[in-house]
Amino acid sequence: MEPKPTQHHQPDNIRSIISTIAILLIAPIIAVVLTLYVFQSYQVNGESMEVTLQNNDRLIIWKVPKTWAHITGHAYVPHRGDIVVVHDDNLARYGDAGKQIIKRVIGLPGERIVIKNHTVTVFNDAHPGGFQPDKTLPYGAGSVIPDTDGNINMTIPAGQIYVMGDNRSNSLDSRVLGPVPVQNIIGKLALRILPFTKMDVF
């Protein structure tokens, strides 16, 4: 007796094709959503964050805290000492309109910041006599942060943060651009993934 020919199940083939098409359509959408609201890749361009970060370092920027703040109707304000990627509208004056920059958060909304004699001092309710974040917070351990040029005495407006690069002598930051509105924060540095020899968690 000859074997019966194999029967092709047309509905199964159609379902397989539809599933494949759906995956091809949905995957880019998921990728866009993740980039907009969860994380994004970022490459350092320049020396303004040396020695903490180097030119061409590849980073992962974490966006969930900002996304959650937006969902709950609150402004996202990072912690002092966090490294954040921001979009600064004032960069247009330097031919860098639309550029994202990476800096460290030094001053928070409502605080008074003074830069004098190459030293940064922050005044707030908890420290009415002022304190020096570059010398008292972990990021400044081991004298990583050099002296800070500038002559600044200002109160940071509500809803804005004061940011600076760790390489103070080679950083275009709030000393020139002014404070950054918190809505211009893209996200917080989470990981350095390249080069592999310097992979790190922040």
Image: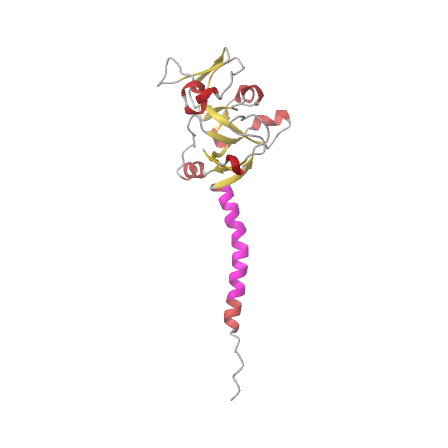
Q: Is residue 23 magenta?
A: yes
Image vertical order of residue 152 relative to residue 42, above or below: above
| In this rendering, position of residue 196 left or right of residue 72 | right
Q: Residue at x 45, y 29 (%)?
A: 82
Q: Position of residue 47 (x, y in %)?
A: 58, 26
Of residues 21 and 7, which is closer to you in this image? Answer: 7
Tell me where the magenta segment starts and ends, as one range: 16-36
Q: Position of residue 178 (x, y in %)?
A: 53, 21
Q: Main secondary structure of the magenta part?
A: helix
* Residue occupying the far bottom of the picture: 1
Q: Residue at x 58, y 21 (%)?
A: 170
Q: Residue at x 49, y 36 (%)?
A: 199
Q: Position of residue 119 (x, y in %)?
A: 48, 14
Q: Is residue 74 magenta?
A: no
Of residues 97 and 1, which is closer to you in this image? Answer: 1
* Residue occupying the far top of the picture: 117
Image vertical order of residue 112 relative to residue 42, above or below: above
Q: Position of residue 65 (x, y in %)?
A: 42, 36
Of residues 130 and 91, which is closer to you in this image? Answer: 130
